[in-house]
Image (cartoon, helix red, strand yellow):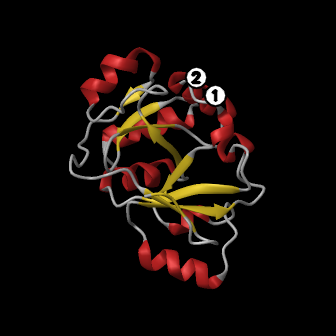
Amino acid sequence: MNLHLDTAARIIHAGGVIAYPTETVYGLGCDPFNREAVNKLLAIKSRPWRKGLIMVAADLSQLDGLVALSGVQREQLASIWPAPVTYLLPATPAVPEWVRGEHAKVAVRVSPHPLVRALARAVGTPIISTSANRAGQPPARNRFQVARVMGAELDFIVTGDCDPRARPSTIIDLETGQVVRA
């Protein structure tokens, strides 16, 4: 395993908050099942928990037990992912309310970014993925911007590249087909 990713995974397991490159911007991540870690991440972002957070996974199997999918829905997602598309999926009780926010569904993505997938694989579970910025501020697109704005509050910054041509992931409610964010 990549030493950089191994370090990031150990920090996530210990309840830390990291920054890492995603498809378009740097993201903040932590263990979605660790309430203190999520609270720390939300405090760094100045984001209310009620909005909910996105989880990224290495593959669809990492979502087993977290989302309630029919066989057809599972096949649909398997044919689409990995892709820069986030789906709102019915959450099981295993998804903490501090991840779902005030919603019955959870936002999840299997990222096409190789580093994101490798990080989730190294952690062994999905991880939180939210843009590395404070509320109302533009998101960071490289590690230097992350370090300048919030570096002292983070436990680790993973080095890597974002795709400057990419756009934020589309968010689609799988059950209704409604595009929540284009």
Residue 155, position as x, y percentages in the image:
45, 24
Q: Secondary structure at mark 2?
A: helix
Q: Residues within 10 Å of mark 1 (few under 14, many from 20)?
A: some
Residue ID at (67%, 80%): 70
Q: Using residue 142 as the reference point, say whether residue 34 is left or right of it.
A: right
Residue ID at (63%, 64%): 89
Residue at the extreme top: 152
Q: Amino acid at mark 2?
A: Ala
Q: Which mark is residue 39?
A: 1
Residue 2, position as x, y percentages in the image:
31, 45
The residue closer to the viewer here, 4 or 115, is 115
Q: Secondary structure at mark 1?
A: helix
137 shown above or below 84:
above
Q: Which mark is residue 43?
A: 2
The residue closer to the viewer here, 93 or 145, is 145
Q: Residues within 10 Å of mark 2 (few under 14, many from 20)?
A: some
